[in-house]
Image (cartoon, helix red, strand yellow):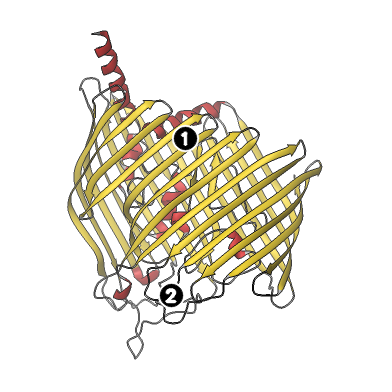
Amino acid sequence: MMRTKLSLHRGAALAALLLAGTATSAHAQFSGDAGSGSGGASTSGASAADPAAGKKDKRGEGQRKERRVDVSPYLEVGQVITADLKNGGDVLTYSTAAVGVDVSVVTRRAELAAGVRYEHQFGWGRRQRDQDIISGLARGRVEVGQGLNLEGGALATRTRADGGGSDSSLFIGNRNNVANTYSLYAGPTFARSIGGLDVGAGYRFGYTKVDVDAPTLLPSGSLAQNVFDGSTNHVAWGSIGQRPGDLPFGWQVSGGYEREDASQLDQRYEGKFARADVTVPIGPTVALLGGVGYEDIEIGQRDPVLDTNGVPVRDSSGRFVTDKSTPRQLAFDTDGLIWDAGVMWQPSRRTSLTAKIGRRYGDTIYTGSFVYRADHATTFQVGVYDGLSSFGRGLSTGLAALPTQFDPLRNPLSGDVNSCVFGEQGGGCLNNQLGTPTAAQFRNRGIQAVMSSRAYGWSYGVGLGYDRRRLLVPATSPIASLNGITDENYYLFLTAGHPIDRDSDITLSGYLNYFDNGSPGGSDVQSAGITASYGRRFWRGLTGTAAASLTAFDQDGFNSQLIGSALVGLRYNF
């Protein structure tokens, strides 16, 4: 009898933990969110109602007690040399001057991690022009009242305009085929127990912009996709639920609304949902999950301007010009019943597994997550996602999924932020969001795994994944040939750092990327690179850096490249 009571108690605790994050479990129903779309691996493809998310919040509370405010502005100068080692290309040389700041804040009510940098490159010779580069990544949260938080994040980075990878080593000394990407999100979230009920709500505003200097170069006969321009998106959600106690199960009722307006072809995404969920403990470590609801989603866009030959007109950046006189046509339209069912397993406070199968978008979907926290410094996360997304909504969601504490990692030669971040709260990668800056909406499926650890004086980080996008374009549009095109991206990023002594350290990083272009005549892209850097502190805030990298790049229809680069530089932290 005692064992039965203990089993019921642990089962109820498990269900209570599952329902503890009601504020964002409703949020996770939106397109592009973890467990629903292209969410980042930091939430491992599940809603924040998962035990993993709950434990991460508790870890954050513990960290906030260890008050830490570290603001490190700096000036940096360097000299870079780069050469194509395979094709006998010219050796390019340029100097750099940069100003930036790294921030890490942990207090009782706030957490913030950020790194922002402005760099000017002075080219030597006619082949290497001067250029300005703004890069940075920030993620933070501030508690403004009981249960009420303000959250936000921002990103400035570079990616390939034609897809095929986001690793910054591809752009060392080169501005060709570069899409400068800027994205931010901000909004309040609320989660509190009121009268025995868990009440949650939130709102998020997102903005994303991509600048392209010139149309991308593609092999002859290939079909060029439309490069993303800019968009704004709004998300609002709310939920109410009750933990097990008076009832042998937990329940939640939730609903929300999302809208995105993109400048490209006057595109619009609009979705709303309402649903009810239950969590039923069936053992001390296992609970059954189930939910049913209603969803209504519409995606539409206008036609491009056509020339006298009926060919879509593009502007100087290679984007389609919008024909404002045409009506908006639907690229995707669904409404009706949605459901999902699954299981949650939590054998310990450090380990949790969630797996679900359901029906959405007129199709069967599979989502899931696995989180294992071996100790305070080691976290392993896996997320499986399936949903509708876009370049703009995906970046807003990816930023929101990143931890609020991470080590700001940059490519030492290009100065750009790395696509993956790692820290004591875990990590996350934006590769699946940055891989292809397409202007089209798309069905998004994939898996991402992230590991972050510190052991034997080394700091490690590994991120890998697979992302699949099927484009959604109106069947009667002049660009209907893009409808159904499927792009696939495989990626791996790893980094390791170790202090040699009190005043010096080494850092190693590497990546692999394969982009399978689904466009007719489209060129697949393969790239790989490795970078090593050595840093030594000379005097107070003065640090010297030496770095070298080797990058291999191969795109169908173009000559393959093997690029070698080296840097020496000085940095002064104030």
Front residue (pair 172, 197): 172
Picture layout, residue 142 above or below residue 186:
above
In this view, the residue farthest toward the top is: 2
The numbered disc on residue 144 is: 1
Residue farthest right in this picture: 539
User: Which of 271/236 is in front?
Assistant: 271
| Badge 2 vs badge 1, beta-carbon distance below 8 Å | no
Q: Residue at x 67, y 40 (%)?
A: 498
Task: Give residue 215's position: percent from left, percent from top.
Answer: 50, 76
| Mark 2 vs 1, N-terminal side | 1
Q: Position of residue 1 (x, y in %)?
A: 23, 8
Q: Is residue 143 above or below residue 563?
A: above
Residue 488 occupies quadrant: bottom left
Is residue 411 toward the left or the right of residue 155 in the image?
Answer: right
Mark 2 lies on residue? 319
Q: Can residue 145 be seen here?
A: no
**Residue 435 locus on image (x, y percent):** 46, 60
Q: Is residue 227 above or below residue 75?
A: below
Q: Report helix, strand or loop for mark 1.
A: strand
The kind of residue on which mark 1 rests is Val
